[in-house]
């Protein structure tokens, strides 16, 4: 944390900030590039951009900090329990990413050569700047906008927040330049792992949908009148990709297996659904940690599991006593994407008839999506060699449908060329606009209270489809925030339903695989099981060594798994918790920075 170390040093030495001669936006790049000697040709720009690829956030493989995940010690858990303040929050110190992009943009004028390539690489740098600021806006709303690497220390140290509207307009300007100048994938020396025109458009689609819906549903910004312009841009960017003919939903007729292949394959080169991806291989010396998604420190939430439809297209929540179905029954006759996302009854990690049994201490619904299915490319930390999507055509289709619905421009034809292509892939019934609007799902309507239009039903179903299709891809936190659905984060997450203490079948063979017991000294509830079954049981206790476990059952001896950290409830303060505070030490250093939405208290 370079900036944090700088602040600490200043405070200890008693140095006044006005006398300081170094700042994160002023330092030379780590490679100590001398611009006049280095930026001469388009190839120099290409080489320089490698550091921007290396520094960009990796492809997400989980939805931590959202209502899709049960996990202790996360930012979200600390937030809803009132344990985050300007005095203990992290973040804000990643500005080197921006400085690297701006340093190149400041020096592009030096380059001589093919103007088309110069504009291409300039567009790539502006894409990275836009991606950086899109993340900053999502977290902090108003943020300082820097269009240059800065040569004036005092200006860099003492700049205040710029209004969200101005920063978002600047992000859009960067993306529009990039979309008009970055080359298509087949002309940019790329196999899909580098920024192309269509990767830019995918980010534009994502950012404009996020900004448009955030403005529409958040009156505290006083920007509702400008929401439609961003939603229109989202639809247009999506449609440019759709009309290009370069991308399609990956399907070979295998249903859920085709969906799985997008997240566990050793390469995504040539996959027409993938707009941009991150490569991993021993030859490159690059791997990932995807083995850790399965049963490591989190599991997926009951509310996510309940969102998946039945195979016949009806809501799971319309089933009689749906909230009292055991683990095995919960997976029966469901959308195939459920069993590709959550570890299902009878899953064998090594395909050897040794079945995976989830731990109730995490909730029971362990994440399977992204877990390498082939043991040959599944190893340990940093040595899993699966390809990871950064932008999928599926997301673009969902962005398109949602933007059109929010603009009241959606038609059945729009659904058929977007959402319904995703349902076709997994052999699910198609979404009918008239049916959805005629009978909105009451569970979804209760979850998303602010949706109120002629398209309410179909907007709710698009949100369902987005949650299901994009689960664990790192987008859910922002989705909940932009929809102003903090009520979902206020709800304590839960895991699977446990009908009674004792043995539980987790593999679907009718034989108990684990047991939840009152304590180490009370095994009465499993005494009726055969001795060999009792001997194999994985045992978990509500009270262990005289202390309450980290999980409990909502009704005492039965009910849904819940977590001890939530026994006292959760809170969600609106609108404050849709944003994050700037660390107080940054405010001390720069008194032009001000907290917003009550984070100064």
Image (spheres, helix red, strand yellow):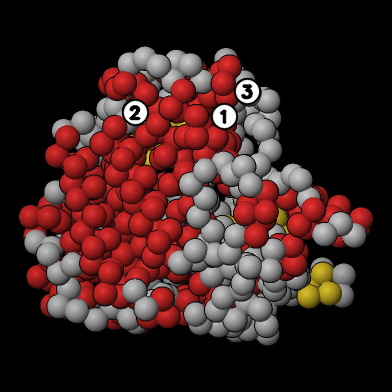
Residue identified by numbered label 2:
119
Please tell me which residue is depicted at 21% across the width and 31% down the height of the picture: 246
Residue occupying the point 56% across, 21% down: 36
In which quarter of the view is residue 84 placed? Answer: bottom right
- Picture quadrant of residue 566: bottom right
> How far is disc 3 from disc 1 in space, using C-alphas?
16 Å
Residue at 35%, 57% in the rendered image: 169
Report the residue at 49% width, 63% height from top: 162
Whether residue 478 can be seen here? yes
Q: Is residue 72 visible?
A: no
Mark 3 is surrounded, within 10 Å at the Cα level, by few (under 14), some (14 to 19) or many (20 or more) other residues, namely few
Which of the two residues, 384 or 217, is positioned nearer the viewer here? 217
Indicate whether 173 appears above or below 481.
above
Q: In terms of secondary structure, where does tag 2 sit?
A: helix
Q: Point out the frontmost of discs 3 and 1.
A: 3
- Asked whether 145 or 445 is in front, the reply is 145
Marks 1, 2: nearer the viewer:
2
Percent coordinates x, y for residue 563 in the rendering: 65, 72
The dot on residue 491 is: none
Q: Which residue is mark 1?
A: 51
The mark nearer the N terminus, 1 or 2, is: 1
Residue sticking out furthest to the right: 13
Q: Secondary structure at mark 1?
A: helix
Residue marked by disc 3: 34
Q: Residues within 10 Å of mark 2 (few under 14, many from 20)?
A: some
Of the image marks 3 and 1, the number of the one nearer the N terminus: 3
Q: Is residue 468 above or below residue 117?
A: below
Look at the numbered disc 3 and give the secondary structure of its residue. Answer: loop
In terms of sequence position, does the residue under pointer 3 or pointer 2 come before the other? 3
Q: 392 left or right of 534?
A: left
């Amino acid at each position: 944390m370079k900036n944090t170390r700088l602040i600490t040093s200043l405070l200890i030495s008693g140095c006044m900030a006005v006398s300081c001669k170094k700042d994160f936006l002023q330092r030379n790049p780590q490679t100590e590039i001398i611009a006049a000697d280095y930026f001469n040709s388009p190839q120099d720009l290409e080489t320089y951009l490698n550091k921007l690829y290396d520094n960009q956030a990796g492809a997400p493989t989980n939805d931590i900090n959202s209502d899709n995940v049960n996990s202790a010690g996360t930012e979200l858990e600390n937030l809803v329990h009132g344990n985050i303040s300007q005095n203990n929050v992290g973040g804000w110190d990643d500005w080197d990413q921006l400085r690297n992009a701006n340093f190149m943009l400041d020096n592009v004028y030096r380059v001589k050569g093919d103007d088309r390539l110069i504009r291409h690489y300039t567009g790539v740098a502006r894409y990275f700047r836009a991606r950086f600021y899109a993340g900053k806006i999502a977290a902090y709303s108003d943020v300082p906008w820097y269009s240059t690497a800065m040569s004036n220390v005092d200006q860099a140290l003492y700049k205040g927040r710029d209004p969200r509207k101005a920063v978002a307009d600047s992000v859009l300007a960067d993306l529009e330049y990039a979309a008009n100048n970055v080359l298509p994938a087949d002309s940019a020396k790329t196999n899909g792992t580098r920024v192309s025109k269509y990767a830019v458009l995918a980010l534009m689609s994502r950012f404009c949908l996020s900004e448009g819906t955030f403005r529409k549903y958040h009156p505290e910004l006083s920007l509702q009148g400008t929401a439609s312009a961003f939603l229109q841009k989202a639809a247009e960017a999506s449609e440019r990709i759709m009309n290009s003919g370069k991308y399609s939903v990956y399907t070979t007729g295998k249903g859920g297996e085709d969906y799985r292949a997008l997240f566990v394959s050793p390469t995504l080169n040539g996959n027409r659904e993938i707009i941009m991806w991150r490569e991993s291989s021993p030859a490159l010396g690059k791997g990932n940690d995807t083995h850790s998604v399965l049963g490591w420190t989190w599991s997926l939430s009951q509310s996510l599991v309940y969102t998946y439809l039945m195979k016949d297209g009806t809501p799971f929540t319309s089933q009689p006593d749906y909230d009292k179905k055991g683990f095995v029954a919960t997976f029966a006759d469901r959308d195939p994407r459920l069993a590709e996302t959550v570890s299902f009854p009878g899953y064998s990690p090594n395909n050897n008839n040794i079945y995976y049994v989830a731990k109730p201490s995490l909730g029971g619904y362990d994440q399977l999506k992204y877990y390498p299915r082939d043991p040959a490319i599944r190893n340990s930390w940093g040595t899993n060699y699966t390809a990871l999507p950064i932008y999928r055509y599926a997301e673009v289709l969902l962005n398109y449908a949602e933007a059109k619905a929010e603009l009241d421009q959606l038609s059945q034809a729009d659904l058929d060329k977007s959402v319904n292509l995703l349902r076709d892939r997994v052999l699910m019934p198609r979404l009918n606009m008239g049916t959805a609007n005629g009978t909105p799902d009451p569970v979804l309507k209760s979850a998303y209270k602010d949706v109120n239009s002629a398209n309410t039903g179909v907007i709710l179903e698009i949100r369902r489809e987005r949650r299901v299709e994009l689960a664990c891809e790192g987008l859910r936190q922002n989705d909940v925030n932009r929809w102003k659905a903090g009520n979902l984060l206020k709800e304590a997450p839960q895991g699977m339903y446990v009908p009674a203490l004792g043995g539980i079948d987790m593999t679907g063979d009718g034989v108990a695989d684990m047991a939840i017991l009152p304590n180490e000294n009370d095994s009465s509830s499993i005494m009726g099981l055969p001795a060999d079954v009792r001997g194999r049981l994985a045992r978990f206790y509500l009270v262990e060594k005289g202390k309450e476990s980290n999980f409990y059952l909502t009704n005492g001896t039965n009910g849904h798994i819940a977590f001890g950290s939530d026994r006292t409830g959760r809170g969600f303060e609106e609108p404050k918790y849709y944003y994050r505070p700037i660390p107080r030490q940054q405010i001390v250093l720069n008194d032009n920075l001000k907290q917003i939405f009550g984070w100064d208290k």
